[in-house]
Amino acid sequence: MSSRKAVCILSGGLDSVVSAFYVKQVKNLSPYTITFHYGQRSTEEMRRARLFSRLLGSEDHKEIDMGFMKDLYGNDNALTGENTIIPEKFHHSIVVPHRNSIFLTISAAWAASLKIGVIVYGAHADDQNYPDCRPKFVSSLADMLYESDLDAIDLGLRKRIEIWCPAKEDIHKDELIRIGYDLLGDKIFDTWSCYSDEALNSLNNPVHCGACESCINRRASFNIANIQDKTIYAT
């Protein structure tokens, strides 16, 4: 990689958190973290992102309020629509159109101002249902970012941006979990995967619902990784 620093998109979820720790501790990149609120139903994501940004020792942490996107998506999307049913299995209603394109482009603007040449996000090899998580998308967007800042890059004023994600190295979710457990230990269970904050424990604290597509994938991946899942689920 061309830089000793990286802008890491941190959702508070398992994939993004482990990816950020991986590039810091394995690839020796100093992280700057950024989190997006796009009107998603789970606001617990933001709190977990702050928690892990501190634990990561991020040089800086930005929270970008894009709540207006909820109005753009309306009730067409299950992750932003208040009255939409969140599915237990993959359904196109949980694909948020152009979400990663937007997040990565905004992250690139911050990276450019910091003279940073690497952006990190948590797309892995099992995310094939999501077009903006595939290696072809990553390569295409990196080329677009280069073209959009070509003159400054060629003059040496800014860096050409590389986008790194686990999918680029064919890392699957169960492998990512094993990596994360090695790096984080039981802290990995503090990551947040649930699409909703509606499930509560006896102390009225949010817990994973255990029934949405993301919770089900989380449970299954810990099982495949042969690591006891200590996440608290409502069901």
Image: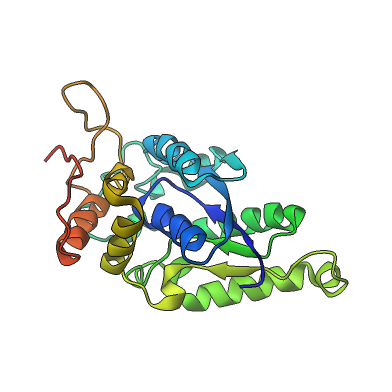
Q: How is the image coloured?
A: rainbow
Count numbered badges in the picture. Answer: 0
Residue 100 at x, y percent in the picture: 51, 59
Q: Nearer the viewer, residue 171 or 206?
A: 171
Image quadrant for the C terminus?
Answer: top left
Q: Residue at x 17, y 45 (%)?
A: 230
Answer whether residue 157 is visible to the viewer in this image: yes
Q: Nearer the viewer, residue 105 or 177?
A: 177
Q: Residue at x 85, y 64 (%)?
A: 157
Image quadrant for the N terminus?
Answer: bottom right
Residue closest to the far top: 203
Left or right: 60 as drawn, with respect to 83: right
Residue 94 placement: quadrant: bottom left
Asked if 87 appears above or below 39 in the picture, the reply is below
Residue 119 at x, y percent in the picture: 59, 62
Answer whether residue 98 is visible to the viewer in this image: no
Residue closest to the far left: 235
Q: Nearer the viewer, residue 176 or 139?
A: 176
Residue 158 placement: quadrant: bottom right
Q: Nearer the viewer, residue 3 or 108?
A: 3
Q: Residue at x 57, y 77 (%)?
A: 139
Left or right: 19 as drawn, with respect to 78: right
Asked if 60 appears above or below 199 in the picture, the reply is below
Q: Residue at x 33, y 63 (%)?
A: 179
Left or right: 199 as drawn, with respect to 123: left
Residue 19 at x, y percent in the picture: 44, 60
Residue 27 at x, y percent in the picture: 52, 67
